[in-house]
Amino acid sequence: MQMTRDIGRQSFSASGMAASARAGVGVATASEPSLVQLRQVSKAYGEVIAVHPLDLEIAAGDFLAILGPSGCGKTTLLRMLGGFIKPTSGTVSIAGEDVTAQAPERRSTNMVFQSYGLFPHMNVRQNVGYGLTIAGVARAEIQKRVDETLALVRLESLANSRVTELSGGQQQRVALARALIMRPKVLLLDEPLAALDLKLRKAMHTELRTLHKAVGGTFVFVTHDQGEAMALANRIVVMDKGRVAQQGTAEDIYLRPSNHFVSTFVGEVNFIAGTRKAGQVEFGGGRFADPGSDGKVMVGIRPESILLGVQEGTTDFHFSGVIREKLFLGPFVQYVVEIPGGSVTVYGRALRLGEGDPITLGWSATDHWVVDTHG
Ligand code: ADP
Ligand code: MG
């Protein structure tokens, strides 16, 4: 199948959007193969295994976030998608074609780097049009596409500015435009907002969501920031030491983390030690049925899922404790409450209670989860 040669006509199509709507949160159905398929893809740098053999499917129209701490293999994985790194094993397919041996410029992918990589001696217009110029597209067509793309990232008024005169956020938008103008089937973004301050980053989240909807393409976004992944993506792949730790929607990962790593990496969590015996978990005076093998477990509960000052019988679990710390954090007050068997952090409202005061707390059985600790 001819793909990257045909950049003049290939486009972010309406069918891409329709496909994503049909595919729901990006789980490809049997009748509709995913746009990108990784099969047992791995990368070793000598002794260091940056990415262990993994399978990954990306549906057309997905906004996928690859989330994980520094060094977990995110960039390596993204670069294998873009063709900048050759996998040690496995195959990469895009739109049904095996592209494992294909060079980056032959693939229907395009990458936005953290360092922008703009040409300082060119103005905005020349930077954005560069890829089409190299591809030998006619001048009038380049002009039209540059105008369209600059409008998309709201940079029309800066078309003739030198890129060195732009702010970090504006340079980032030029880098985005330069990639988008090539109408890649898959846009790869490697921590593109890392250099921006928090406020600008949040503004860019909104812009990126709008852009993704407008072009109807497939975005793969690498980040170490769980808030960013949740703010952007319809599907998140959490990586830990070169492996996929969990994948799913933001809700799946936040509310039903499948292991200890994901529980702690994504958001704040309290872990209360317990034991499982004959299908019953016992912890800090609480007890509930939970199928699984006998052994030590941790009961995970988010600080915002714990209610303070509840009457016994109104929540599934109920404890009496003592406030050990109270911190005003703006949107909420953070309490550390000592309960039998340990202490928990709770996000709540301002109460006329302080350190040393007794308090009750409780939560619903649907809000916690159990992680085996194998020890
Ligand atoms: P991330 O983007 O998640 O921070 P990387 O993909 O950059 O992670 O790196 C994954 C692992 O591979 C790290 O241990 C890193 O040190 C190692 N690594 C990355 N690039 C190279 C390289 N060119 N040579 C040797 N080791 C590398
Ligand atoms: Mg990286």
Image: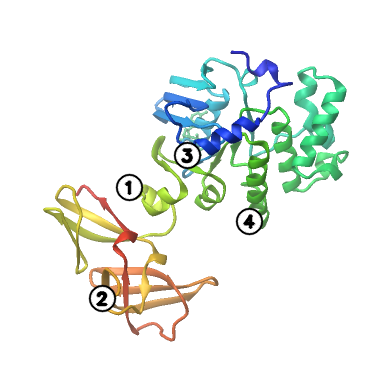
Disc 4 crowd rating (10 Å Cα; few below 14, some 14-19, many 20+) is few
Q: How many marks?
A: 4
Can residue 136 be seen here? The reply is yes
Residue 230 vs residue 337, the one in the foreground: 230
Which of the numbered marks, if any, corresponds to residue 71? 3
Q: Cα distance, mark 2 to mark 1?
A: 30 Å
Tags 1 and 4 in contact by the CB under 8 Å rule? no
| Residue 271 percent location from the top left of the image | 31, 60
Marks 3 and 1, the one that precedes in the sequence:
3
Marks 2 and 1, the one that precedes in the sequence:
1
Image-quadrant location for residue 156: top right
Disc 3 crowd rating (10 Å Cα; few below 14, some 14-19, many 20+) is some
Label 2 element class:
loop
| Residue 56 percent location from the top left of the image | 44, 30
Tags 3 and 1 in contact by the CB under 8 Å rule? no
Amino acid tagged 1:
Asn
Marks 1 and 4, the one that precedes in the sequence:
4
Amino acid tagged 2:
Gly
| Residue 73 percent location from the top left of the image | 47, 35
Q: Cα distance, mark 4 to mark 2?
A: 43 Å
Between circles 2 and 3, the one closer to the viewer is 2
Amino acid tagged 4:
Leu
| Mark 3 beta carbon near ligand 1 (under 8 Å) | yes
Q: Residue at x 51, y 27 (%)?
A: 36
Q: Cα distance, mark 1 to mark 4?
A: 29 Å
Q: Cα distance, mark 2 to mark 3?
A: 47 Å
Label 4 element class:
helix
Q: Which residue is mark 2?
A: 313
